[in-house]
């Protein structure tokens, strides 16, 4: 796999954020941190597209909007404690 060198501009706060993760040993360098962010965003996008596709192929629901909303709230509470 080939690599491409990019130059980006960050605020001081953004640079400090990245450096703190590198200093803590979470990442070995700035590039590793940025690549990890991109991989996570790619995965988030894949999951979102899959969820949209699932919704579109599932058809019309026989449940009421209130039932759907209540289930969504319960899922949110379960995931976020």
Image (cartoon, helix red, strand yellow):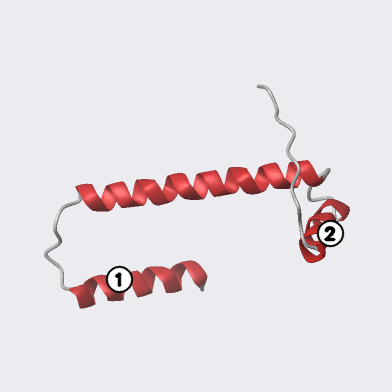
User: Which residue is at 88% across, 54% downward?
Assistant: 23
Which residue occupies the foreground of this view, 37 or 13?
A: 13
- Estimate how packed mark 2 is, as few (under 14), some (14 to 19) or many (20 or more) residues with alpha carbons within 10 Å: few
Looking at the figure, which quarter contains the N terminus? top right
Q: Is residue 66 above or below residue 75?
A: below
User: Which residue is at 16% across, 73% downward?
Assistant: 64
Horizontal arrangement in the rendering, residue 36 relative to residue 43 (left or right): right
The extreme left residue here reads: 62
User: Which residue is at 83% across, 43% downward?
Assistant: 28
Residue 27, given in percent of the width and then of the height, sits at: 79, 46
Which residue occupies the foreground of this view, 50 or 11?
A: 11
Residue 53, given in percent of the width and then of the height, sits at: 29, 47
Horizontal arrangement in the rendering, residue 6 relative to residue 19 (left or right): left
- Estimate how packed mark 1 is, as few (under 14), some (14 to 19) or many (20 or more) residues with alpha carbons within 10 Å: few
Residue 65 appears in which quarter of the rendering?
bottom left
Residue 54, given in percent of the width and then of the height, sits at: 28, 48
Q: Is residue 68 above or below residue 43?
A: below
Residue hosting label 1? 71
User: Which residue is at 15% across, 61% downward?
Assistant: 61
Disc nearer the start of the sequence (2/1):
2
Disc 2 vs disc 1: Cβ atoms closer than 8 Å? no
Residue hosting label 2? 20
* Label 2 residue SS: helix
């Amino acid at each position: 796999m080939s690599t491409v060198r990019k130059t980006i501009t960050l605020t001081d706060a953004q640079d400090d954020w990245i450096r703190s993760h590198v200093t803590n040993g979470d990442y070995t360098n700035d590039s590793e941190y940025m690549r990890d962010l991109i991989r996570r965003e790619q995965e988030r996008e894949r999951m979102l597209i899959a969820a949209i596709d699932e919704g579109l192929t599932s058809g019309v629901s026989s449940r009421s909007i209130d039932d759907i909303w209540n289930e969504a709230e319960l899922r949110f509470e379960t995931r976020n404690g």
